[in-house]
Every structure is written in C-alpha cells, then in structure tokens.
Image (tube, grey):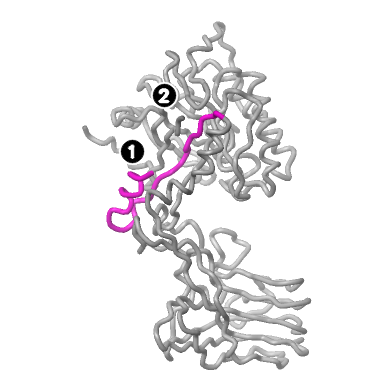
Amino acid sequence: MSTPKNLSLIPQAIILLVLLCGAATTAARPIPPDPTDFLHVDGRDILDSDEQPIHLRGMNMHTNYYAFTWDPEAPLRFATQEDIQFLADLGMNVIRLGLHWKYFDTSLGYDLTDDYLDWCEQAGVYVIIDMHVVPPDERFGMEGIWDDTAAQEEFLELWVDIASRYADRTIIAGYDIYNEPAPPEASQWWELADRTAAAIRSIDPHHILFVENPMHVNAGFELLDDPNVVYSLHDYTPFIVTHAGADWIGDTPVPDDYSYPGDLLTKVAWVDWSSDAVSYRGQTDDWIYWDSGPLTPPEGVEFATIKLFAGGDCGDVWFDDIELLINDVLQAVYNPGAEEASPRDPEQPANWDFYRNDDFSGTWSDEEAHSGNYSLKISAGEGFGLWLQSDWILTEPLFPIGTDDTFQVRGWLLAPDNASGSVILGLDYLNGVYEYYDRAHLQADIQSFLDWAALNDVPLFVGEFGAMSTPSGGSRCDLIADK
C-alpha cells in the first residue's frame, strides 16, 4: 500500500485518539434522522447504531489552523480524500477535525467541513468536530474569551450554526466544543461548557458532546447535566520525550537527549545564588562596564543561569550586553543585548524572564541602551527584582557546571538614581528534577481521571497524545506502545 503524497502534510507530532472504556445559512433537512443511527453514550461506553461498544481510534487533523491567519488557503491543502481512505486502510475509524472559528467568517468553514464529512462517510471514518481556536483569538492559546462576553456569545452562536447544519449527519461522532480551555478559574470553563451544551441541545439532541478539562489550572472534570457526554483529556507526558527538540514551545528548543523509559527531566529547581558576586552600590549617569568577579558554584550543582539583580533604594537600573566566562573562556549567551523579541510574546525579550518580590517592576526598555535599541530595566519599590534565563525544562540558556569550574559575569549597567541599593551581575544555581518514567508512571499520571470516570460511570477519552519524530533511539515507539 503506497502512502498518499498529501499525508506528508500531517505534522511530525502524530497525535492519536483512543477511548478508555470500563457565517453561512443552514438548511433544514426534511426527514429527521433516527436517533439510533448516532453514536451515543451508555454508561462508560460509546455505542454504535447496533448498540455495540465502539472504540474510537484515529488521529487529529489540525487543518493548518495555525497558518490560516497568514495563508487563508492553507486549510484546503492539508489533506485529500485519498488521505482519509489511507487512514481507514490503516484501521483508524475516527478523525478529530481541528477548526479555527474564523474559518466561518466566509464559506471556507462549512466547505471544508463538508468535504471531510463526505470523504469520511465514504471511507467509514467518524468525525469529531473540534473547535481548536475560539473567539476572539487569532491563534490557539491566547484565551481572550474569558473576559469578553461578546466573544462568548459569538462562540455560542457559532456552535448553534454548526449544530443546525449538521444535526442529522450520523458520520459525526460528536462535537469537541473547546480545545484545551485554560481559564484563570476552572469555574469559568464549566459555566461556559454548560451554556454551550444547552445551546447545542436546543438544536441537536443526538450528537455526543466531547468536553475537556481546564488545562492551566490543573483541574479535573465536572459532570455536565447531559447523559450524552464524553469527557476528554490530553496526555503528553513525559513532555521532554513527546516534544523532544520542538522549537515552538518557548524561546529555545526542548532538550532531545533524554530516552524513554528512563530518568527524565521534568523541571529545574533553584539551589543557591552567587553570594560572592561584587555588588555595585554607586550612582552613574553613564553606562559603566561592571564585573561580578570570580564566582565559585557550590558543590553538587548542575546548572548556572545568569541573574541580573537590583534591590533596595536603587531607583531605575538598566542592564545591557551581558557576557559570561567559564574558566576565563567567553561563552555564548542567549540574547545578551536583549535585542530579540520572544516568539511566545513579542512584547517581551527572548530568553529573559522577570521575577520580583513586593512591588519592583521589570521592563524590556527602549528608553536606554548601551548598544542597539533595547536593554533590561528594573525599577525600585519595596524588595527586589531580577531578570533570569531559567525556564522550565528549556535548558539551552543554562550552563552546565563541571568540577572546579569558575564563572564570571560581565556587562554594562546604568544606575543614575541609585541611593543605597545593590546592583549585581551574578548567577543562580539550579539542579534538574528527574523522574523515572515507564509504563507504571504513565498509568499513574492519568489514574485520577480513570478513577473519576469509574466513580461517575462516564466514558473517558484521550483526545490527544503522541510523540514527535525527534526523540532519541526507539523512545518514540516505546512510549506510544506503553500509552
């Protein structure tokens, strides 16, 4: 069997689905469908039209939603009917069709969805319609909906339109109403989920609703007052393997030198700081070149990260053109002059994050610069503020510490209002936090969800899991086999 050429458009992160068991005008169709023709929930099972349990196994089709804002034709190039048939020949029986709400500003949304439904109907593959980007966001993850009542109403109206158009299409397994909601408070999601379910049910009483748990608040599920709901989670643990080498997670790539099963980095933790760094306590109206002096890390520490510190009555302080030496050898520093914007947030500098206690503030400043156009600014209040380059598991900006290594931080600073404050070019010392990951750990990661589903007698669905092609050795296949 040959692979259709367009299947190469499906991204390297091959995302699978599995069930864990026990602005267009809509046109009404004259003959209502038989309710028994739809997939439907019965206890912890999804049943087909013959009242037999069905395990939905397939893959996500993201339809190039992320490219749509700069290339409106991108969704039309994602896949073809030949690709859907190829997936069916592999034994898959469902796709999760990722959509951008702005598809529906024109006829694209329904034209695209109609194509996939027709292709899948001919191939015998069910479709989960997944709203992957919701109003008012241009791209996934912006989460502007929570404080925007107009966007929430637009979201509900869109689902009513979709349900009106497709209420009788039995090839649709159901509606995944919101991909990875991440509200400030979990209650905000469950309120919107209840409203969305009610809106859809006013039009479509038959299709399953797939409802996800809120992501960023580390919350579990809550029951909706609807008997035809499947509860869906996403599982990318351990992240350092599933997303090895990914350069779109943060400002630097995810490490790609860890293997599954094995000890895997899950975060970095603060150990100590360079208390031997020389503190600048003067006042200067001109940029001065400052040197930390020799810095000796404590024993048993794995990483060092650059730390730009200001505390006390220091006024406004600017830092620029930072250098690091290890054993008197100059090292490459990420974004040393703070000239590059972060791809995660174009309003912030790449590879630098600001931390504070009390009311210090940090700014990516264009007011002053030793060279270029930008510098890193700290403004005094009570307490202290600092700029760091440590970020979760993105270890490229960090510097491994060898036996007997000595460090030195140099750079330019401007402190015109420093009264009695302390300004330091120094280091923080970090250790990696590791967990041994194997099949048992994977089970433990989702056990609370399994227990909740069993307690409430509802189906649990893994709407996304997978691994990129970049993990070392056979880690990718080993991980997917265990999941």
Q: Earlier in the sequence, mark 2 or mark 1?
A: 1
Q: Residue furthest top?
A: 31
Count the marks: how many? 2
What kind of element bears circle 2?
loop
Residue 461 located left or right of residue 8: right
Assign the C terminus to one quadrant of the image. top left
Looking at the rendering, the stretch of residues picked out in magenta corresponds to: 457-483
Question: What distance separates the C-alpha of mark 2 from that of mark 1?
Answer: 26 Å
Q: Position of residue 398 (x, y in %)?
A: 47, 74
Please give the residue where the numbered disc 2 appears in the rendered image: 54
**Depth check: 68 or 191 in front?**
191
Tell me the amino acid under the disc marked 1.
Leu
Please give the residue where the numbered disc 1 appears in the rendered image: 7
**Depth check: 199 or 275 in front?**
275
Give above or below for 100 relative to 170. Answer: below
Q: Position of residue 81 (x, y in %)?
A: 36, 27
Q: Position of residue 313 (x, y in %)?
A: 77, 84
Q: Is residue 327 visible?
A: yes
Q: Position of residue 39 (x, y in %)?
A: 48, 20
Give above or below for 140 relative to 421. Answer: above
Assign the N terminus to one quadrant of the image. top left
Residue 345 located left or right of residue 400: right
**Depth check: 185 or 90 in front?**
185
